[in-house]
Amino acid sequence: MDHGTRGELVDRLAEAIGSLRAAHPLRVAIDGPPAAGKTTLADELAVVLRARGRHVIRATIDDFLFPRAQRYRRGQYSAEGCYFDAHDNAALCRVLLDPLGPGGGRRFRHAVYDADADTSYLPPAMTAPEDAVLLFDGVFLLRPELVDRWDLRVFVSVPFEQTVDRAQHRGTAPAGSPTHAAAIERTWRDRYIPAQQLYLATARPTDHADVIVDNADLQRPAWEARPPRW
């Protein structure tokens, strides 16, 4: 693996995207476990690409959730529910990935779910320029239903124990709240981490990733391109 600063990593990813040629917008998946740093990496990459003159569409799997009753029908801490019931992958393909892909009309929507209202939501449709870049972050993006719909696949890897620590650090409850800390701990250990283990065992996302980022050290990440692009 190569090691460097965050800026170097983002520049390398931007160069990789710039080297891709397609007759449709490029669809970039930034996959990995919760609290791995996917959203931050996607946001940083968006800044660099826009500065280079690319039209960037930012979207996230959190806007393609099913309503809460469906997500938790197997129970609040079900790993199987997290993997199989949480995300509307069919809608993701229908309104976003397929329209931006080969033969698509480039008329897309960036969401189907309103988290605040916990209900379905359809924002106005937009038309993407042909040379646009979709930066899409989320979990389980390289599962069989989605893996072939990406033009570049990035997997952000972090030890599971470290994701628990990061989740505790970014928690929104009052500082020092033991109840909130315990809820985060149980959610990660009973739902999120086992769901990721299920995903790794069944979908083998790292086998499909074009770039694997070791994001354990946020300031000095490591990365590997497979097959080498750089």
Image: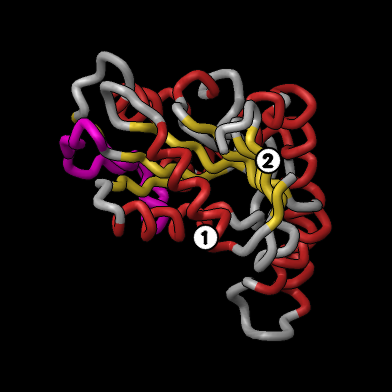
Q: Give the amino acid type for the residue marked by disc 2 in the picture.
A: Glu
State the image coordinates of residue 18 (x, y, percent, origin top left): 38, 39
| Vertical relation: 111 (above or below) 208 | below
Residue at (57%, 38%) from the top-left corner?
A: 230
Residue numbers of the magenta segment:
109-131
- Left/right placement of residue 108 relative to residue 170 reads left
Q: Secondary structure at mark 1?
A: helix
* Count of numbered marks: 2
Residue at (77%, 67%) from the top-left corner?
A: 165
Q: Which mark is residue 173?
A: none
According to the picture, the residue beneath numbered tag 1 turns out to be 40
| Vertical relation: 212 (above or below) 84 | below
Q: Give the amino acid type for the residue marked by disc 1 in the picture.
A: Thr
Q: Earlier in the sequence, mark 1 or mark 2?
A: 1
State the image coordinates of residue 144 (x, y, percent, origin top left): 59, 19
Q: From this viewpoint, which residue is outermost toward the front?
A: 230
Cα separation between marks 1 and 2: 19 Å
Residue at (25%, 19%) from the top-left corner?
A: 104
* Crowd band around label 2 with a 10 angstrom C-alpha radius: few (<14), some (14–19), many (20+): some
Q: Main secondary structure of the magenta part?
A: loop
* Crowd band around label 1 with a 10 angstrom C-alpha radius: few (<14), some (14–19), many (20+): few
Quarter of the image where one finds residue 218: bottom right
Residue at (45%, 27%) from the top-left corner?
A: 151
According to the picture, the residue beneath numbered tag 2 turns out to be 224
Between label 1 and label 2, give the one nearer the viewer.
2
